[in-house]
Amino acid sequence: MASDRTPHAFPQFTTVEQERTHRKQRLAAAFRLFGHFGFDEGAAGHITARDPELLDHFWVNPLAMNFKQIRVKDLILVNDRGEVVEGTWPVNGAAFVIHSHIHAARPDVVSAAHAHSVHGKAWSSLRRPLDPLTQDACAFHGDHVVFEDYTGVVYDHEEGKRIAHALGERKAVILSNHGLLTVGHTVDEAAWWFITMERTCQAQLLAEAAGTPVLIDPDQAAKTAQQVGQHRSGWLMFQPLYDWIVADQPDLLDD
Ligand SMILES: [Zn+2]
């Protein structure tokens, strides 16, 4: 029997309104998934989506709203001065400081994700990059960096700039003693890199607790990175999660 579903196609838009709605739906879904996976830690954590028209504005979660309850209509729009220009809830100060500098430094980046997930923050205390221990880990091979400073909650714009500078052209940065931060050309991609990076930290912590893991050799790791680390690969990996969370929690699309 033929499936009543169709394969995923990369989205195309004819209007900026369509593109904005799409980004907001993906963003709300990403928060629900982060909540589902337990990446929330009280009011900490933020995912941003650049507005497709007002390129120095971004959509973000309202301060201290539970990830598991966020709907499209709850998302707030923040301008380049950190002012909320759509929505009634305040913005997390650290979200603005970190994400505004990343969005400014990386015009290609549509979305950035950061949360205090357990394995990411545990790994971040080691101040080491992740090793190519698994096929999935190869997505980060040569494409992430450790930001070694820790100076408290990031409210200082100079630190926001230094984090963006450390990230460079990569897809992820490990913020020492703090947690993970990932970026992407779509919300889907940024959210997926975060989810799989958190699990990659978990896998390396498990492997090192059990013994001495054998690394994938550098040539194979580089080849695999080309296979699993592309922007479209990250986008595709998010699609089954999006389908499930929307089917499970359709109110997330309420606008
Ligand atoms: Zn944080």
Image (cartoon, helix red, strand yellow):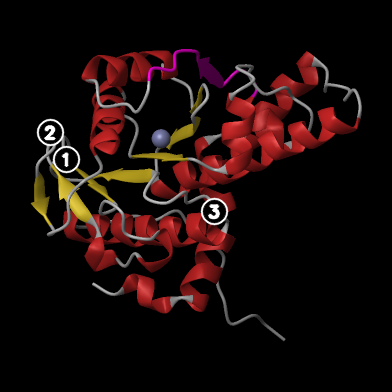
Within 10 Å of disc 1 (Cα), the crowding (few <14, some 14-19, many 20+) is many
Could you say which quadrant of the image residue 228 lies in?
A: top right
Write down the residue under mark 1: 57
Within 10 Å of disc 2 (Cα), the crowding (few <14, some 14-19, many 20+) is some
Relative image position of residue 76 (x, y in whole percent): 20, 54
As drawn, 144 above or below 84: above
> In what quadrant does ligand 1 lie?
top left
Looking at the image, residue 209 sits to the left or right of residue 8; the answer is: right
Magenta region, residue range: 141-151
**Residue at 24% in and 64% down:** 74
Looking at the image, residue 157 sits to the left or right of residue 202; the answer is: left
**Disc on res. 80:** 2
Contact? badges 1 and 2 (CB < 8 Å)? yes
State the SS at label 2: loop
Write down the residue under mark 3: 238
State the SS at label 1: loop
Helix, strand or loop for the magenta stretch, by majority: loop
Query: Between disc 3 and disc 1, whose residue precedes?
Result: 1
**Which amino acid, mark 2?**
Asp
**Which amino acid, mark 3?**
Phe
Q: Judge whether residue 105 can be spotted in this image.
A: yes
Is ligand 1 within 8 Å of the beta carbon of the residue shown at mark 3? no
**Residue at 30% in and 17% down:** 159
Contact? badges 3 and 1 (CB < 8 Å)? no
Query: Between disc 3 and disc 2, whose residue precedes?
Result: 2
Using the numbered discs, state the Cα–Cα distance from disc 3 to disc 2 in whole angstroms.
29 Å
Relative image position of residue 70 (x, y in whole percent): 34, 64
Q: Confirm whether the magenta stretch covers residue 145.
A: yes
Q: Judge whether residue 8 can be spotted in this image.
A: no
